[in-house]
Image: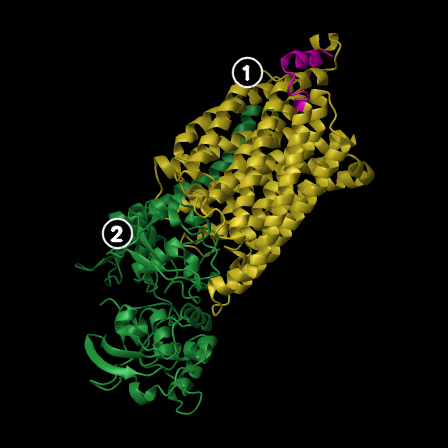
Amino acid sequence: MILLMSQDSPDKIIDKSARLVFSFFISSAGLWLLAAALLAYIAAAKLTDPFFLASCEFLTYGKVKVAQANAFVYGWGGNAIFAVSLWILARLSQAEIRGRLFLILAGVIWNLAITFGLLGILDGHMSGHEMLEMPTEVWPAMLISYLIITFLALVIHRSRQVRETIAPQWFLLAALLWFPALFLIAWNGLEINTARGTLQTVLSMWFGQSLIWLWLTPVALGAAYYLIPAILGRAIDKYYLAIFGFWCIAALAPWSVVHHLEGGPVPMWIPAIGTVMSIAMVFPIAVASTNFHATAFLDVGKVWNSLPLRFVIFGTLSYTISSYIGVVFSLPAVAKITQFTIINEFHFNQRVYGFFSMIVFGAVYFALPKITGREIPVAAKNFHFWTSTFGVLLLLLAYLIGGLTHGVLAGQPTLPWSSSVIASIQPYFLITKFAFVILGFSQLVFVFNVWKVIFPNPFTCCANASKEVNV
Amino acid sequence: MNNLAKFTIGIFLTLGIAWLAFVVGARSQYGDLTPTAQVLDEDGSVPVDAELFPLPMSGLAKQGAEEYAALGCVTCHTQQVRRVEAGFDVERGWGKRPSVPRDYVYQDHVLLGNSRIGPDLANVGLRGHDEAWFHQHLFEPQTIYPQSLCPPSPFLYSTVEQAGDTVIEIEPSDDLGSSRLIKPSARADRLVAYLHSLKQDYELPEIAFVEDDETEDATQIDVVASVDEPHVQLPEWLRNQIESGKEVYMKAATGGGMCFTCHQVNGKGLEGQFPPLAGSDWVLGEKDRLIKISMYGLMGEIEVNGVKYNNVMAPPGIPPGSLTDDQIANVLTYIRNEWGNSASAISAEEVARVRASLKDRPAMQMFTAAELTPPVQ
């Protein structure tokens, strides 16, 4: 009732309530994106010239590479997940975001924890567990701040106006809830009741891969399930399949991720079960792909003309292709060649950049103008889209072809390692360095676009800003 | 799906089943994994007085593992030899056998890794490298493998002016450089101790050595796999290399090596005059030393397997010193794998690298044993 009486539409009120929180999370995400881009460039440059910055101990390759992945997943990914899922949940629940002060506070803790964590890695306190390399001291801070944010997201969801839930809500809520569960399992198994021997690796591999499958992936899928119908103005085609797709991911993904251990010193049933479940993953992939693309291809012109949607569809196509490639690479006959090669980099970047990040870009370009009431120049958005597309494709092609070369040559025991096998893939490292420069520029433009609408007049502080809010 | 509590229970249930399998299930399977003897008694019990494997790690090596983790070495190096049907690892000489879970029960940090921009390190302690080699590699890998992408770690070393007990000399890689003297820090020592400790050179009840593993690096003379068998089980490339090497060894005409005239067809040499090659610690040990001798010859006193010889070995080949990189690689691979010897093959690239590092040395200037750091007994 109160909503109806006020001048603004309900969506406007919700957007207003999201303004501070969304701006905070997305502008911190942008900064992390730039930090990750810089680290990615340094790591790539070190692979083309090992003497680059060689005397700096804190910038040695192993540390930079790990810091980059952590900055990308927790810094950019984490903040982006908070921003996007809070806003979408609020919109779908038709409820305002509450506890904004706590959200910002938790966000500050989260960002500080990651900052200290990354500095810890560079300073030589890396733990060596996949995607949990940050020193254990920052883990409690991360968990607590995360739980505060998740709790407040659940509060939004609980106060929804319509009882029936839809696909984007399932995916977003599941992602928000899975992360702390994964984190606690890994924490317990690696630090508290430390597992013996190679079981540690099973656990950290399971955590690292599940983080991508059960945290980043569902958020991006949820955002796509929300954005495609919202922008196109039509319902998801064959929507009744979505629930099947959701439970397939929930049931299969935690099993499928361990196929990377094929042939290693772990009980043989672990990678075997991983391979079987990976193959079964074709079902949820097919469902999501059908839902998104059957809907989008009904109105290709609109997809092309709406920049946020172009980003989202790039992401969903990338998801489909990369997931099918992942299924093929999990077959033991193929894994024999591709395992341990730089195809791992292909998978990681395809998933976190080609899929997750592109959908988040789309979500931000869709949400920001509504939330702030200011438009982002079309040319700047287009520049971001095309440089990102080109950079990602270049990067992925280099890693894919380079990875296959790597695997095939490594399989020939007569070829000496560094002077033949690794020397043959060096040109691809050069291409990735170039691609990271392009992506760096692209991300700089994105951050500039975002900051420009959030802080239009950075030097004339609060007085003007508050006026604009009232307009 | 509409009830948040039920939904939450549902999504945790799916996760929980996987957790039950991978964490609870696998943990109970690992529960009784303890060090054991290489061969069990018939009734399956560990024989009394048998040495148990894997051996515990030394304190220094454990500290080294921390350094290894902190420097992020695991980003590029795996420490796992895959099963034979799942990969080329054994064939490449990265291990005598696939790794099994029991190999890792003593490690606090299990760093299996999942990327190989560098080679696998599960058995790096078995490749016949001495400590100085490891230090040189850590300090600047490119002085050993010019095309290596491994980051140099000069911050683990201090440069010193004077030679000393622990000081290592790094020879210049080109004409312009001068040799450098470096002193390892405590951290470097720990890392090297750790790397040295990485070896899976024992059999376990659940895993035996892979049969045809003569390609793999072994410096121990007593691990000869098949003493008098012909090289039928070897991979084709290695068989070819050994055959070409044998031609060089036996040929006493232009382009040959004429090695047999002194070292004999049976590789045993002549007592008191020419040292043996069969079972020789010089032949089975460090490759570089052997390559240098094959290029420049050797003179003066030398101790082989505890026996002293004093003679002159002119630069091999007819005419002297004329052996090509390929010929040297082949003949050395031959002598390292004949007469019951079993050690890793030597490639033409490795010879070329040594040749490049010696280009300032006058032709025909024979080495002396003292110049070459004799093998550690």
Magenta span of residues: A454-471
> Residue sitting at 27 percent across and 73 percent down?
B369
Q: Numbered disc 2: what chain?
A: B
- In the rendered structure, does residue B14 fall within the stretch colored magenta? no
Nearer to the camera, A154 or A435: A435
State the quadrant of the C terminus of chain A.
top right
Counting from the top left corner in percent of width and height, residue A400 is at: 61, 54
Q: Are marks 2 and 1 in contact (CB under 8 Å)?
A: no
Q: Which mark is residue A101?
A: 1
| Residue identifier under label 2 | B56
Q: Which of the 4 quarters of the picture holds residue A162?
A: top right
Residue found farthest to the bottom: B253
The amino acid type of the residue labelled 2 equals Pro
Q: Is residue B166 visible?
A: yes
Kind of element beneath mark 1: helix
Counting from the top left corner in percent of width and height, residue A356 is at: 62, 38
Task: Please tell me whether residue B357 is drawn above or below residue B10 in the rendered image.
Answer: below
Give the chain letter for yellow: A
